[in-house]
Image (cartoon, helix red, strand yellow):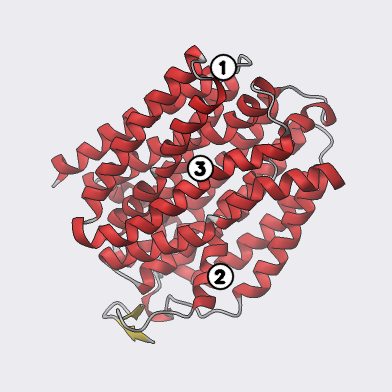
Amino acid sequence: MYSITKNGNCKCSEENTPGWYLLGVLSLLMGFASISTDLYLPAMPVMIKSLNSDAGMIELTVSGYLIGFSLGQLIWGPIGDRYGRRPSIGAGLILFIAGSAGCALSTNALMMISWRVVQALGACASVVLARAMIRDLYEGVRAAQMLSTLMTIMAIAPLIGPLAGAQILVFSGWRAIFWLLVSIGIITLIMLFTIPETLRPESRNGEPLINAMVRYGSLLKSKRIIGYAATGGFFYAGMFAYVAGTPFSYISYYHVPPEFYGLLFGLGIIGIMAANIINTRIVEIFGCDRVLFFGTVLACVSSIAAAISAKTGWGGLPMLVAPLFMFASAAGFIVANSITGALADFPDRAGAVSALVGACQYGSGIIGAGLVGLFADGTPWPMGLVIALSGVGSLLSSRFLHRAD
């Protein structure tokens, strides 16, 4: 099933691929970025009263999560390169479990935000190192195809997350959502040690962790890494503005019942799944960069349309949902290809590169979600404006890649 490269990593041939169980576990690990937020989205308006807070503070629970998720990746990347993928992910899962329990026991918004940071510091280990495991196993276009496949599988989590969260909210309250996350963390921790380690001992980076952290500077000298990171970063700013803004835009502004919010949110996930499936077919024909550029054009056009609808209210809810659906769908062409492109030039530092790109993406998400919360005015306009600026920025950044060649 596996062959060994000159760097000592496990590799899969075109014919021999990992079993579906391994791919399923990797999908679950990558899904921690979404399940940690999507499950409780329908509960956000209810949490305002329960925690004696306001909409802006509750939206900052998303930003707080992104702060921990972004900064944590910079730590876990070098740790995974030095000590291996599985033990590093395991340590992160333990932290995630503790953070989820803290969220469930929170009694005010500041406490919730703090525990969300802890939860994110643990969750990001699963995501950044699962991507590195894919790079351990695959290269080039094949890596992009496998990332798209895994993202299609893991999209089930955000698809059913808001639906499940809404039902849990109705029958058990919002705290039960975080206790469910505790259970998911424990189950995933058990499953983790049933899959093989992909980074062999002889290929691990033995330098001190402080040196590995300093060497992030050398990665930032690569114009191509900057281009890929910025393209994905701007897009993530828009996506998390979408995540932070839609609960209040749909539920509070357009009066969508919380139990039906998940259906509207799920439309975007279906679009992402469809785009990822298409990406696995066309990336081999057109290449990662061309498909990535197409995705940024789609994101830019749809984001501007969403902003116009949010500002004018023309067409009501349907004309807001439609362009947001197209914007979210663009993730299927942007995320996998931007990550694969960045990883291609530094196979021996896959963990660190994955961490750096991920930190840029989710760091931008902090800004996107934070701006929506900061300028919240009870209408969809702040969300629409942030998404539009993000779409334009992603398109302009993708053009930087051509100048870097």
* Residue identifier under label 1: 375
Whole-percent x and y of residue 184? 70, 61
Q: Report the label total.
A: 3
Picture residue at 82% right of the left edge, 30% below the top: 51
> What's under tag 2, amino acid-wise?
Val
| Residue 157 in view in this figure | yes
Label 3's element? helix
N-term-proximal mark, 3 vs 2: 2
Decide: few, some or many residues near mark 1? Use Cα within 10 Å; few <14, some 14-19, many ≥20.
few
Residue 317 vertical position relative to residue 40 in the rendered view, above or below:
above
Whole-percent x and y of residue 220? 30, 45
Decide: few, some or many residues near mark 3? Use Cα within 10 Å; few <14, some 14-19, many ≥20.
many
The numbered dot on residue 25 is 2
Give the camera-side residue of 258 and 190. 258
* Residue identifier under label 3: 268
From the image, state whether disc 1 or disc 3 is nearer to you.
3
